[in-house]
Protein backbone atom coordinates (compact mmCIF):
# COMPACT_ATOMS: atom_id res chain seq x y z
CA UNK A 1 0.00 0.00 0.00
CA UNK A 2 1.10 3.56 -0.61
CA UNK A 3 1.37 6.35 1.88
CA UNK A 4 2.33 9.67 0.42
CA UNK A 5 4.30 11.53 3.01
CA UNK A 6 5.33 14.91 1.75
CA UNK A 7 6.93 14.51 -1.65
CA UNK A 8 7.97 10.92 -1.34
CA UNK A 9 6.08 7.69 -1.21
CA UNK A 10 6.32 5.16 1.56
CA UNK A 11 5.45 1.60 0.81
CA UNK A 12 4.25 -0.85 3.41
CA UNK A 13 4.42 -4.33 1.98
CA UNK A 14 1.22 -6.36 2.19
CA UNK A 15 3.32 -9.28 3.49
CA UNK A 16 4.45 -7.18 6.43
CA UNK A 17 0.84 -6.36 7.26
CA UNK A 18 -0.07 -10.05 6.94
CA UNK A 19 2.78 -11.05 9.26
CA UNK A 20 1.72 -8.43 11.80
CA UNK A 21 -1.80 -9.80 11.62
CA UNK A 22 -0.38 -13.16 12.60
CA UNK A 23 1.17 -11.62 15.71
CA UNK A 24 4.70 -10.97 14.39
CA UNK A 25 6.03 -8.13 16.55
CA UNK A 26 8.97 -7.47 14.19
CA UNK A 27 6.58 -6.94 11.28
CA UNK A 28 4.48 -4.68 13.47
CA UNK A 29 7.62 -2.73 14.33
CA UNK A 30 8.12 -2.13 10.58
CA UNK A 31 4.62 -0.71 10.36
CA UNK A 32 5.36 1.46 13.39
CA UNK A 33 8.56 2.77 11.84
CA UNK A 34 6.82 3.72 8.62
CA UNK A 35 3.77 5.34 10.17
CA UNK A 36 4.59 6.63 13.65
CA UNK A 37 5.71 10.07 12.51
CA UNK A 38 2.36 10.73 10.85
CA UNK A 39 0.32 9.44 13.78
CA UNK A 40 2.44 11.34 16.31
CA UNK A 41 2.15 14.61 14.37
CA UNK A 42 -1.56 14.07 13.88
CA UNK A 43 -2.09 13.62 17.63
CA UNK A 44 0.28 16.47 18.42
CA UNK A 45 -1.68 18.84 16.21
CA UNK A 46 -4.99 17.63 17.57
CA UNK A 47 -4.09 17.78 21.25
CA UNK A 48 -1.44 20.54 21.14
CA UNK A 49 0.15 18.69 24.01
CA UNK A 50 3.37 16.68 23.75
CA UNK A 51 2.83 14.40 26.74
CA UNK A 52 -0.65 13.56 25.60
CA UNK A 53 0.52 12.98 22.01
CA UNK A 54 3.23 10.62 23.37
CA UNK A 55 0.76 8.62 25.45
CA UNK A 56 -1.89 8.46 22.77
CA UNK A 57 0.62 7.41 20.09
CA UNK A 58 1.71 4.51 22.31
CA UNK A 59 -1.87 3.57 23.07
CA UNK A 60 -2.78 3.79 19.36
CA UNK A 61 -0.16 1.18 18.41
CA UNK A 62 -0.90 -1.08 21.37
CA UNK A 63 -4.56 -1.05 20.42
CA UNK A 64 -3.69 -1.50 16.74
CA UNK A 65 -1.61 -4.58 17.55
CA UNK A 66 -4.41 -6.10 19.61
CA UNK A 67 -7.00 -5.58 16.89
CA UNK A 68 -5.00 -5.77 13.66
CA UNK A 69 -6.82 -8.98 12.76
CA UNK A 70 -9.96 -6.89 12.32
CA UNK A 71 -8.25 -4.87 9.58
CA UNK A 72 -9.81 -6.40 6.48
CA UNK A 73 -8.58 -4.00 3.83
CA UNK A 74 -4.80 -3.69 3.95
CA UNK A 75 -4.95 -0.51 1.84
CA UNK A 76 -6.85 1.16 4.64
CA UNK A 77 -4.04 0.72 7.19
CA UNK A 78 -3.19 4.43 7.42
CA UNK A 79 -6.82 5.53 7.72
CA UNK A 80 -7.41 2.76 10.26
CA UNK A 81 -4.49 3.89 12.44
CA UNK A 82 -5.68 7.49 12.25
CA UNK A 83 -9.16 6.37 13.19
CA UNK A 84 -7.85 4.58 16.30
CA UNK A 85 -5.80 7.66 17.20
CA UNK A 86 -8.81 9.93 16.74
CA UNK A 87 -11.06 7.72 18.87
CA UNK A 88 -8.47 7.62 21.64
CA UNK A 89 -8.07 11.38 21.49
CA UNK A 90 -11.86 11.87 21.67
CA UNK A 91 -12.07 9.51 24.67
CA UNK A 92 -9.26 11.44 26.32
CA UNK A 93 -10.81 14.87 25.92
CA UNK A 94 -14.05 13.59 27.44
CA UNK A 95 -12.19 12.89 30.66
CA UNK A 96 -12.53 15.63 33.26
CA UNK A 97 -9.63 17.69 34.56
CA UNK A 98 -7.45 17.26 31.51
CA UNK A 99 -4.64 19.70 31.99
CA UNK A 100 -3.65 20.73 28.51
CA UNK A 101 -0.38 22.55 28.13
CA UNK A 102 -0.31 24.12 24.73
CA UNK A 103 2.85 23.60 22.71
CA UNK A 104 5.04 26.62 23.15
CA UNK A 105 8.21 25.84 21.26
CA UNK A 106 8.50 29.05 19.37
CA UNK A 107 7.89 31.74 21.90
CA UNK A 108 9.61 34.30 19.79
CA UNK A 109 7.30 33.52 16.89
CA UNK A 110 4.02 33.20 18.73
CA UNK A 111 3.13 36.76 18.00
CA UNK A 112 2.16 36.49 14.37
CA UNK A 113 2.28 40.21 13.85
CA UNK A 114 6.03 40.06 14.35
CA UNK A 115 8.24 41.39 11.61
CA UNK A 116 9.38 38.54 9.38
CA UNK A 117 10.68 37.80 5.92
CA UNK A 118 8.82 39.24 2.97
CA UNK A 119 5.66 37.20 2.38
CA UNK A 120 5.60 37.96 -1.32
CA UNK A 121 8.88 36.36 -2.35
CA UNK A 122 8.95 33.55 -4.90
CA UNK A 123 7.48 30.08 -4.17
CA UNK A 124 10.83 28.33 -3.66
CA UNK A 125 11.83 30.81 -0.99
CA UNK A 126 8.46 30.53 0.66
CA UNK A 127 8.63 26.74 0.79
CA UNK A 128 11.99 26.77 2.57
CA UNK A 129 11.52 29.84 4.72
CA UNK A 130 11.70 28.40 8.24
CA UNK A 131 10.61 31.60 9.89
CA UNK A 132 7.53 31.87 7.75
CA UNK A 133 6.81 28.17 8.30
CA UNK A 134 6.90 28.70 12.06
CA UNK A 135 4.48 31.59 11.78
CA UNK A 136 2.11 29.44 9.74
CA UNK A 137 2.58 26.53 12.17
CA UNK A 138 1.58 28.75 15.08
CA UNK A 139 -1.36 30.07 13.11
CA UNK A 140 -2.50 26.46 12.45
CA UNK A 141 -2.45 25.81 16.20
CA UNK A 142 -4.92 28.62 16.68
CA UNK A 143 -7.45 27.03 14.31
CA UNK A 144 -10.41 25.00 15.59
CA UNK A 145 -9.79 21.28 16.03
CA UNK A 146 -11.79 20.20 12.97
CA UNK A 147 -9.66 22.44 10.77
CA UNK A 148 -6.38 21.39 12.42
CA UNK A 149 -7.27 17.76 11.79
CA UNK A 150 -7.77 18.14 8.03
CA UNK A 151 -4.82 20.50 7.61
CA UNK A 152 -2.51 18.07 9.42
CA UNK A 153 -3.65 15.04 7.47
CA UNK A 154 -3.69 16.71 4.07
CA UNK A 155 -0.86 19.22 4.12
CA UNK A 156 1.54 17.98 6.77
CA UNK A 157 1.12 14.22 6.31
CA UNK A 158 0.18 14.29 2.64
CA UNK A 159 -2.96 12.14 2.90
CA UNK A 160 -5.49 12.11 0.08
CA UNK A 161 -8.98 13.57 0.50
CA UNK A 162 -10.55 10.09 0.22
CA UNK A 163 -8.49 8.74 3.11
CA UNK A 164 -9.19 11.77 5.30
CA UNK A 165 -12.91 11.33 4.64
CA UNK A 166 -12.63 7.70 5.80
CA UNK A 167 -10.83 8.67 9.00
CA UNK A 168 -13.31 11.38 9.91
CA UNK A 169 -16.33 9.47 8.52
CA UNK A 170 -17.44 12.47 6.51
CA UNK A 171 -17.89 13.06 2.77
CA UNK A 172 -15.09 14.17 0.45
CA UNK A 173 -17.00 17.41 -0.09
CA UNK A 174 -17.00 18.14 3.64
CA UNK A 175 -13.26 17.49 3.83
CA UNK A 176 -12.64 19.92 0.97
CA UNK A 177 -14.95 22.45 2.50
CA UNK A 178 -13.08 22.25 5.83
CA UNK A 179 -9.78 22.60 4.02
CA UNK A 180 -11.05 25.66 2.18
CA UNK A 181 -12.35 27.26 5.40
CA UNK A 182 -9.07 26.51 7.15
CA UNK A 183 -7.05 28.10 4.35
CA UNK A 184 -9.28 31.16 4.43
CA UNK A 185 -8.91 31.45 8.23
CA UNK A 186 -5.15 31.26 7.88
CA UNK A 187 -5.17 33.84 5.11
CA UNK A 188 -7.06 36.20 7.40
CA UNK A 189 -4.75 35.52 10.33
CA UNK A 190 -1.73 36.15 8.13
CA UNK A 191 -3.26 39.03 6.19
CA UNK A 192 -0.72 41.32 7.78
CA UNK A 193 2.00 39.73 5.67
CA UNK A 194 0.02 39.88 2.49
CA UNK A 195 0.33 43.61 2.29
CA UNK A 196 3.95 43.60 3.38
CA UNK A 197 6.19 44.35 0.44
CA UNK B 1 -18.69 40.67 -14.86
CA UNK B 2 -19.15 39.20 -11.41
CA UNK B 3 -18.30 41.36 -8.43
CA UNK B 4 -14.95 40.80 -6.71
CA UNK B 5 -16.69 40.18 -3.40
CA UNK B 6 -18.55 37.15 -4.78
CA UNK B 7 -15.45 35.81 -6.49
CA UNK B 8 -13.36 36.20 -3.35
CA UNK B 9 -15.90 34.23 -1.35
CA UNK B 10 -15.45 31.32 -3.76
CA UNK B 11 -11.64 31.50 -3.89
CA UNK B 12 -10.94 29.18 -0.90
CA UNK B 13 -13.11 26.46 -2.48
CA UNK B 14 -11.46 27.14 -5.83
CA UNK B 15 -8.01 26.76 -4.28
CA UNK B 16 -8.85 23.28 -2.95
CA UNK B 17 -10.57 22.19 -6.18
CA UNK B 18 -14.04 21.95 -4.69
CA UNK B 19 -15.92 23.97 -7.32
CA UNK B 20 -17.84 22.83 -10.40
CA UNK B 21 -16.28 23.26 -13.85
CA UNK B 22 -18.65 26.15 -14.58
CA UNK B 23 -17.65 28.10 -11.48
CA UNK B 24 -13.98 27.36 -12.03
CA UNK B 25 -14.21 28.83 -15.51
CA UNK B 26 -16.04 31.87 -14.15
CA UNK B 27 -13.25 32.49 -11.63
CA UNK B 28 -10.50 31.89 -14.20
CA UNK B 29 -11.91 34.46 -16.55
CA UNK B 30 -12.39 36.95 -13.69
CA UNK B 31 -8.92 36.73 -12.20
CA UNK B 32 -7.29 37.20 -15.60
CA UNK B 33 -8.47 40.79 -15.52
CA UNK B 34 -8.55 41.41 -11.78
CA UNK B 35 -5.17 41.78 -10.06
CA UNK B 36 -6.80 42.12 -6.63
CA UNK B 37 -8.58 38.75 -6.81
CA UNK B 38 -5.51 37.17 -8.42
CA UNK B 39 -3.41 38.35 -5.50
CA UNK B 40 -5.93 36.90 -3.03
CA UNK B 41 -5.77 33.52 -4.79
CA UNK B 42 -1.97 33.58 -4.85
CA UNK B 43 -1.97 34.24 -1.15
CA UNK B 44 -4.19 31.20 -0.51
CA UNK B 45 -1.96 29.05 -2.71
CA UNK B 46 1.16 30.28 -0.90
CA UNK B 47 -0.36 29.28 2.42
CA UNK B 48 -1.05 25.80 0.99
CA UNK B 49 2.52 25.58 -0.27
CA UNK B 50 3.90 26.62 3.09
CA UNK B 51 1.80 24.04 4.90
CA UNK B 52 2.89 21.33 2.44
CA UNK B 53 6.47 22.08 3.42
CA UNK B 54 6.13 22.20 7.18
CA UNK B 55 8.43 19.41 8.36
CA UNK B 56 6.93 16.69 10.51
CA UNK B 57 8.29 16.37 14.01
CA UNK B 58 10.09 13.19 14.95
CA UNK B 59 8.26 11.08 17.50
CA UNK B 60 10.27 10.46 20.71
CA UNK B 61 12.64 7.53 20.31
CA UNK B 62 11.43 5.75 23.45
CA UNK B 63 7.93 5.22 22.06
CA UNK B 64 8.59 1.86 20.44
CA UNK B 65 10.29 0.44 23.55
CA UNK B 66 7.20 1.32 25.61
CA UNK B 67 4.83 -0.04 23.00
CA UNK B 68 6.80 -3.28 22.70
CA UNK B 69 6.74 -3.75 26.46
CA UNK B 70 2.98 -3.34 26.56
CA UNK B 71 2.46 -5.63 23.57
CA UNK B 72 4.73 -8.31 25.06
CA UNK B 73 2.94 -8.27 28.39
CA UNK B 74 -0.35 -8.52 26.51
CA UNK B 75 0.97 -11.50 24.56
CA UNK B 76 2.04 -13.21 27.78
CA UNK B 77 -1.38 -12.92 29.37
CA UNK B 78 -3.33 -16.15 29.47
CA UNK B 79 -6.52 -16.67 27.48
CA UNK B 80 -8.59 -16.34 30.67
CA UNK B 81 -6.91 -13.10 31.69
CA UNK B 82 -7.55 -11.62 28.23
CA UNK B 83 -11.15 -12.85 28.25
CA UNK B 84 -11.78 -11.44 31.72
CA UNK B 85 -10.29 -8.06 30.73
CA UNK B 86 -12.34 -8.01 27.55
CA UNK B 87 -15.50 -8.89 29.44
CA UNK B 88 -14.80 -6.33 32.13
CA UNK B 89 -14.09 -3.58 29.64
CA UNK B 90 -16.69 -4.28 27.01
CA UNK B 91 -19.39 -6.66 28.19
CA UNK B 92 -19.97 -6.40 31.92
CA UNK B 93 -21.12 -2.75 31.88
CA UNK B 94 -23.39 -3.60 28.94
CA UNK B 95 -24.80 -6.66 30.76
CA UNK B 96 -25.41 -4.66 33.94
CA UNK B 97 -27.25 -1.92 32.07
CA UNK B 98 -29.33 -4.44 30.08
CA UNK B 99 -30.24 -6.28 33.28
CA UNK B 100 -31.28 -3.00 34.96
CA UNK B 101 -33.51 -2.08 32.02
CA UNK B 102 -35.12 -5.54 32.10
CA UNK B 103 -35.68 -5.24 35.85
CA UNK B 104 -37.37 -1.86 35.48
CA UNK B 105 -39.58 -3.15 32.66
CA UNK B 106 -40.55 -6.24 34.66
CA UNK B 107 -41.46 -4.16 37.74
CA UNK B 108 -43.52 -1.83 35.57
CA UNK B 109 -45.35 -4.79 34.05
CA UNK B 110 -46.13 -6.52 37.35
CA UNK B 111 -47.13 -3.36 39.17
CA UNK B 112 -49.16 -1.57 36.52
CA UNK B 113 -49.91 -3.69 33.49
CA UNK B 114 -50.54 -7.09 35.06
CA UNK B 115 -53.67 -8.62 33.47
CA UNK B 116 -56.74 -9.23 35.56
CA UNK B 117 -56.79 -12.47 37.46
CA UNK B 118 -60.19 -13.23 36.12
CA UNK B 119 -60.46 -16.56 34.49
CA UNK B 120 -61.73 -16.98 30.98
CA UNK B 121 -64.81 -18.72 32.37
CA UNK B 122 -65.83 -15.83 34.58
CA UNK B 123 -65.40 -13.40 31.65
CA UNK B 124 -67.83 -15.50 29.58
CA UNK B 125 -70.19 -15.47 32.55
CA UNK B 126 -70.10 -11.65 32.61
CA UNK B 127 -70.71 -11.43 28.87
CA UNK B 128 -73.63 -13.80 29.12
CA UNK B 129 -75.10 -11.90 32.04
CA UNK B 130 -74.71 -8.61 30.17
CA UNK B 131 -76.28 -9.99 26.97
CA UNK B 132 -79.35 -11.46 28.72
CA UNK B 133 -79.88 -8.49 31.03
CA UNK B 134 -79.88 -5.97 28.21
CA UNK B 135 -81.70 -8.19 25.68
CA UNK B 136 -83.79 -6.08 23.27
CA UNK B 137 -83.32 -3.07 25.48
CA UNK B 138 -80.34 -1.03 24.42
CA UNK B 139 -81.11 1.61 27.05
CA UNK B 140 -80.21 -0.76 29.85
CA UNK B 141 -76.96 -1.82 28.20
CA UNK B 142 -74.73 0.68 30.03
CA UNK B 143 -76.55 0.28 33.32
CA UNK B 144 -76.07 -3.49 33.33
CA UNK B 145 -72.42 -3.15 32.34
CA UNK B 146 -71.86 -0.70 35.20
CA UNK B 147 -73.54 -3.08 37.65
CA UNK B 148 -71.36 -5.99 36.53
CA UNK B 149 -68.16 -3.93 36.86
CA UNK B 150 -69.14 -2.65 40.30
CA UNK B 151 -70.01 -6.14 41.43
CA UNK B 152 -66.71 -7.53 40.18
CA UNK B 153 -64.58 -4.78 41.65
CA UNK B 154 -66.36 -4.09 44.92
CA UNK B 155 -68.55 -7.20 45.33
CA UNK B 156 -66.71 -8.44 48.39
CA UNK B 157 -66.79 -5.03 50.08
CA UNK B 158 -70.54 -4.67 49.30
CA UNK B 159 -71.28 -8.10 50.79
CA UNK B 160 -69.30 -7.13 53.91
CA UNK B 161 -71.33 -3.91 54.25
CA UNK B 162 -74.69 -5.73 53.76
CA UNK B 163 -73.85 -8.14 56.54
Image: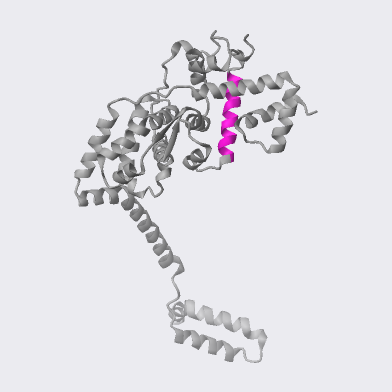
Residue A172 appears at what percent x and percent y?
56, 41
- Residue at 48 percent of width and 42 percent of height: A166
Mark yes or no: residue B126 visible. yes
Q: Magenta stretch: residue A184 in it? A: yes
Please indicate whether residue B133 sits to the left or right of residue A92 in the image.
right
Q: Quadrant of residue B55?
A: top left
Residue B108 appears at what percent x and percent y?
43, 63
Residue B66 appears at what percent x and percent y?
26, 32
Mark yes or no: residue A110 visible. no
In this view, A186 is above or below A60: above
- Residue at 31 percent of width and 36 percent of height: A30
**The one of A106 and A24 positioned closer to us in this rendering:** A24
**The one of A48 and B102 positioned closer to us in this rendering:** A48
Please identify the dominant SS of the magenta region: helix
For the N terminus of chain A, the quadrant is top left
For the C terminus of chain A, the quadrant is top right
Q: Quadrant of residue A78?
A: top left
In this view, A182 is above or below B124: above
Q: Where are the magenta residues, as a range? A: A173-189
In this view, B119 is above or below A66: below
Q: Magenta stretch: residue A138 in it? A: no
- Residue at 41 percent of width and 16 percent of height: A105
Amino acid sequence: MEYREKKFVKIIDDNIIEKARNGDICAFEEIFKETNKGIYNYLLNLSLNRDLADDLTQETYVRAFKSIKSLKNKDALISWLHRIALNLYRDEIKKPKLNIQIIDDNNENNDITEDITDWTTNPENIATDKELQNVVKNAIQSLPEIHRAVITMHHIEGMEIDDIAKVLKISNGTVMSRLARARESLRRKLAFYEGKK
Amino acid sequence: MMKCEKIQKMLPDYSVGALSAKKRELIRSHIKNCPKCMERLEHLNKIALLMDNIPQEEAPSYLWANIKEKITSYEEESFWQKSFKWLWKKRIPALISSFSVLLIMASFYFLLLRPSEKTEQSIYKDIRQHTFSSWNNPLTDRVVLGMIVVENEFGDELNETNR
